Amino acid sequence: MTDWLELIDVPMDAVINGFEVLLGGYPELCDTLRSEGKLGGYACVAQQDGLPILIMALGEPNEAKSATRLEFCQEKVRRLAANTAHSLSFESRDPDNNKWGGAARGKRYIVSFSGMPERLDEYFALAVLYHLQDLSEQEILRLLLAHDNPYRSELHLENFG
């Protein structure tokens, strides 16, 4: 079990920085996402056992889909916590049962996002883990390549820092 003082120390700015880094340098992507009602959603930072530490809205969440996306961000964390051999929730995705990608496992935390396209949700989760100093650039690159995230060539790792 994680010490409660450690839980309190999750820096919210790491979550916010991850979101800003992800979208800040890509105005065309932001415009597209905004027009589709996908320029925001819900982030969850959790312990490795899936217990949420922080849940927050970011960007411009689609009000009509807020309840669903809030549930999805938590479900992704729980599913990844239950599948301890997986690094990404994409590995257990099951669209027929509304199980989507968008969560990533670090050394200390599991981070998820729900609201953007699922592989962009995943990229955001990895950016947050980088800002939490929970995964290195090399580890993130390995995951992006191993699981063929289509945003890996569009959104560059140097933008994480």
Image (tube, grey):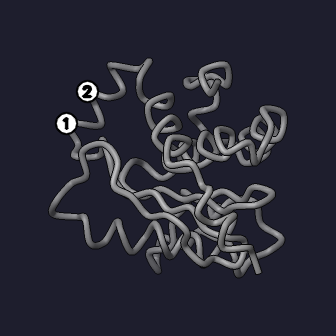
The numbered disc on residue 35 is 1
Query: On screen, 35 above or below 153?
Result: below
| Quadrant for the N terminus in the image | bottom right
For label 2, the crowd category at 10 Å Cα-Cα, with few meaning under 14, some 14 to 19 and many 20 or more, is: few
The structure residue drawn at horizontal position 75% and vertical position 55%, both measured from the top left corner, is 106
Q: Is residue 99 left or right of residue 71?
A: right
**Residue where numbered disc 2 is placed:** 31
Q: Is residue 95 left or right of residue 109?
A: left
Where is residue 149? Give x, y as percent: 63, 41
The numbered disc on residue 113 is none
For label 1, the crowd category at 10 Å Cα-Cα, with few meaning under 14, some 14 to 19 and many 20 or more, is: few
Task: Please identify the residue farthest to the left as the structure is shown.
Answer: 64
| Quadrant for the C terminus in the image | top right
Nearer-the-camera pick, 118 or 41: 41
Query: On screen, 128 above or below 112?
Result: above
Q: Looking at numbered disc 1 in the image, what kind of residue is underneath it?
A: Ser
The structure residue drawn at horizontal position 50% and vertical position 48%, both measured from the top left corner, is 12
Nearer-the-camera pick, 21 or 142: 21
Q: Looking at numbered disc 2 in the image, what kind of residue is underneath it?
A: Asp
Q: What element carries label 2?
A: helix
Q: Is residue 75 left or right of residue 36?
A: right
Where is residue 136? Give x, y as percent: 80, 37
Query: On screen, 39 above or below 98?
Result: above
- Asked whether the residues under the numbered discs 2 and 1 touch, taking CB atoms below 8 Å apart as contact, a structural biologist would say yes
Q: What element carries label 1?
A: helix
Where is residue 15? Give x, y as percent: 51, 45
The structure residue drawn at horizontal position 77% and vertical position 66%, both measured from the top left corner, is 86
Where is residue 30? Give x, y as percent: 32, 29
The structure residue drawn at horizontal position 46% and vertical position 77%, both measured from the top left corner, is 96
Mark 2–mark 1 Cα distance, whole angstroms, equals 6 Å
Location of residue 142 by image quarter: top right
